[in-house]
Amino acid sequence: MADGVAVHAPQFDDAEQQRTASNLGIWIFLATEILFFGALFAAYAITRVRFAEAFAAGSRLTNLPLAGVNTAVLLTSSLTMALGVHAARHGARRALIGWLGMTIALGCAFLAIKAVEYRFDYLEHLVPVLDFHYAGPQADQVELFFYLYFFITGVHALHVIIGIGCIATIAVMASRHTFSPAYFTPVDVTGLYWHLVDVIWLFVFPILYLISRS
Amino acid sequence: MTRRTDTRPVVYVLVWLALLVLLAVTVGTAYLSLGWATTPLNLTISVTQAALVMLFSMHLRFAHPLLKIIAAIGFFGITILIVLSLFDVMTR
């Protein structure tokens, strides 16, 4: 496998066709992911239009500095993943493992910062069901904002956890010399998933943290 | 079938820097009193950032047209979902 000869399963004409099929499969999955988060964004859009002031008030209670840093962390993890895929394409095994390790570290940092943020939310009595107290007007609508906040960020964090698991699996495969310039589809496909989780966060961040703070 | 043209690492770094600059701009809008313009501005920046990631990091600019269509269908689907839902809510 490592000698650069293209390997492909018997149902494909060649490695190129196999690679296209894999990419087609992951992109169809990613499109369903976009639709899945789209339903949450639609729920958010409808409730925000109806309760604009309460959503602005809720948004002001979120932790923008931590979320801003977290966005930068996630964007950086996307860079290290892209460089990892590049290393895989050029058969640089050690570099690939290094970049994957950095991506995992940044993904864990994202989750850690998220956990700190959740802890602050809990201390400020902003967690619906567990402990929610809001003294201002429209408390129910502000609580609705926090339901959406925890659901959207929670489901996104779940995707990050799954992504870290996938990247760790790829790193183990790389350490066992599974990949070569002729075959690195799992690295490529995992990278696409990781980038999409990043893309989704790029929309989650402004809609939850940036509504009329001034 | 897929035309695979390599992307140089420096391109990924430039895209990353552009994404960070856009992040700084979008965070900055939160502290300015831009009124109703804030959200459209935030979303425009998000779409630009998403486009950068998808075209460069996800190699969509070199991808087979079929993949581009599938990616577009996802976004087209949620646009329909959100816009038509809002038509209903906002015209009641």
Image (cartoon, coloured by chain):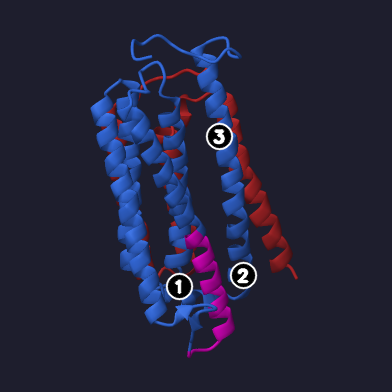
| Eye-nearest disc, 3 or 2 | 3
- SS for callout 3: helix
Quarter assignment of residue A101: top left
Q: Residue at x 62, y 70 (%)?
A: A47
Compared with A128, A156 (above or below) is above
Q: Which residue is mark 2?
A: A47
* Residue pointed to by mark 3: A27
Chain bearing mark 3: A
Chain letter of the residue carrying label 2: A
**First of labels 3, 2 by sequence position:** 3
Q: In which chain is the residue bearing label 1?
A: A
What main secondary structure does the magenta stretch of the protein show?
A: helix
Among the chains pictured, the one given red colouring is B
Name the spot of residue B9 as percent of width and height, x first.
28, 30
Three-letter amino acid code at disc 2? Thr
The disc, 3 or 1, on the residue closer to the chain's N-terminal end is 3
Q: Secondary structure at mark 1?
A: helix
* Residue A137 painted magenta: yes
Dot 2 or dot 1, earlier in sequence = 2
- The one of A198 and A47 positioned closer to us in this rendering: A198
Q: Identify the colour of chain A in the image.
A: blue
Mark 1 sits on what residue? A59
Discs 2 and 1 lie in a common subunit: yes
Residue kind at label 3, given as amino acid type:
Trp
Report whether residue B17 is seen.
yes
Q: Is residue A17 above or below residue A59?
A: above
Q: CA distance from mark 3 to mark 2?
A: 30 Å
Q: CA distance from mark 2 to mark 1?
A: 13 Å
In depth, the one of A204 and A125 nearer the eye is A125
From which residue to which does the magenta span run?
A135-154
